[in-house]
Amino acid sequence: MTVTRLGAGRYIDAAQAPADTVTSLHELTTSDGAKVAGVLRTVPGARTVVALMHPRQDLTHHVLVPELLARGFGVWTQSTRSPNNDIALVHEQALLDAAAGQVFLQDADFDHVVTLGHSGGGTLFAFYHQQAGLPPAHRLRRTPAGRPVDLASADMPIPDGAVFMAPHPGQGALLLRLIDPSVVDESDPLSVDPALDPFDPANGFAEPPHSSQYPDDFVRRYRAAQRARVERLDKVARERVAEAADARRRHKDIGDPRDRRAALIPRVLTVYRTDADLRFTDLSLSPNDRPYGSLFGRRPDLTNSGLVGFARFSTPDAWLSTWSGLSTNADFVRCAPAITAPTLFVELSGDQACFPDDATAMTQAIGAADVTRTCVAGTHFGGPISDGAPTGASLAAADIGQWLAERFG
């Protein structure tokens, strides 16, 4: 008997890199003293390097790496300061990490540097392009939680081009669609308001793999309640930020070591049930070629309650900077008007996170005079749209390679 794992479909096997690929490992120091790591792969004659980065994940083995190398381009894959552990992910700090990589590539022996943002990497690089294009004095000085961040002193080279493949609209904007608003008690992962339960047949849910059919009124109430839950979590996060700030002030005034410890203690938010976009189970909403299910598997009615998911644990700073669609600065549509470099936007026809209306809004928001939008058959992570079909990653790589060759030789 074949057993299908809940997370099936998330990982795509990559092709072999060309035999003449030269690989080097690099440790970089950011402008604020953090250490980040990157891998540079080159092939003979490569004059353009493509930089892949994601705020939360290590992309060393990204499926596009061998595809780009085979087309004659260098590839740089880089992590942020805490890869695969986003409990303290602050996007403004991730920009300093990205800047260190861009400085490294500008100093290397390439004619052109192009950013490539896949999924959450799309908004990270849109945010980078926005801040890099500002005069240093006009860049952000603080995170949404009020933490100082010195983007003004950072060297932030502007890349020569930007590629976006299946970018979602931002971690916070995405979570606004994913978070389960039927949670009525943040301390109880099983608490539920039946009137908002997305997996209750009374509200339109159908047993998988049959598509659900949610009434329009339920969809409207559900989305309003999702926003309300994020507002409540924002309030909690800001209260905890204020508690830490008060402890720091008391320690400065009085010097009591207990206040110092109180300022340092982690005030981690545990956010239950964040895999509940109605479009995962109702394929008539924002229709495209996507399969039934979420980014995390074919049973969102189960994965919604599991450990794997977005924003399960985060510090208040990370919540406000990364996961709150109401507070974050890292939002693709808001950042995109500042992108002025030639841009390619590759839509995946079966994407479960960037829907057709998203792709339209994001491409229309991009400020560059040279914007190309293409669409290839595939799912969000670059998988095939059906068994036996080419992978979305290989189809996207062909479009990306052609666009790079036309723009940068």
Image (spheres, helix red, strand yellow):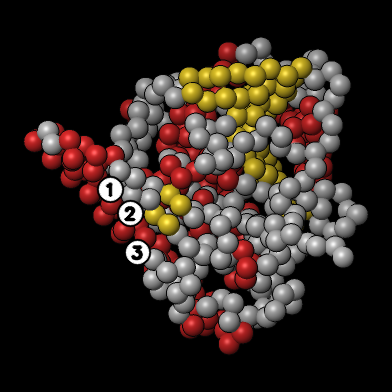
The alpha-carbon separation of the residues under discs 3 and 2 comes to 9 Å
* Left-right relation of 144 to 322: left
The amino acid type found where label 3 is placed reads Arg
Identify the residue under disc 2: 237
Q: Which mark is residue 232?
A: 3
Q: Quadrant of the N terminus?
A: bottom right
The amino acid type found where label 2 is placed reads Ala
Please say if 90 is above or below 282. above
Q: Are marks 1 and 2 in contact (CB under 8 Å)?
A: yes
The alpha-carbon separation of the residues under discs 3 and 1 comes to 14 Å
Q: Give how far across and how far down residue 348 sits, in percent.
A: 73, 52
Q: Residue furthest bottom?
A: 202
**Residue 221 appears anywhere in the view:** no
Please say if 108 is above or below 223. above
The amino acid type found where label 1 is placed reads Val
Q: Are marks 3 and 1 in contact (CB under 8 Å)?
A: no
* Left-right relation of 139 to 264: right
Q: Give how far across and how far down residue 277 sits, in percent.
A: 58, 66
| Helix, strand or loop for disc 2 | helix
Q: Quadrant of the C terminus?
A: top right
**Residue 14 appears anywhere in the view:** yes
Please say if 122 is above or below 61. below
| Helix, strand or loop for disc 1 | helix
Q: Give how far across and how far down residue 381 sits, in percent.
A: 71, 49
Sequence order check, earlier mark of 3 and 2: 3
* Left-right relation of 338 to 46: left
The image quadrant of residue 140 is top left
Query: Who's the residue at 18% across and 45% down the image?
Result: 246
Identify the residue under disc 1: 241
Query: Who's the residue at 85% across and 25% down the image?
Result: 18
Q: Give how far across and how far down residue 319 sits, in percent.
A: 41, 50
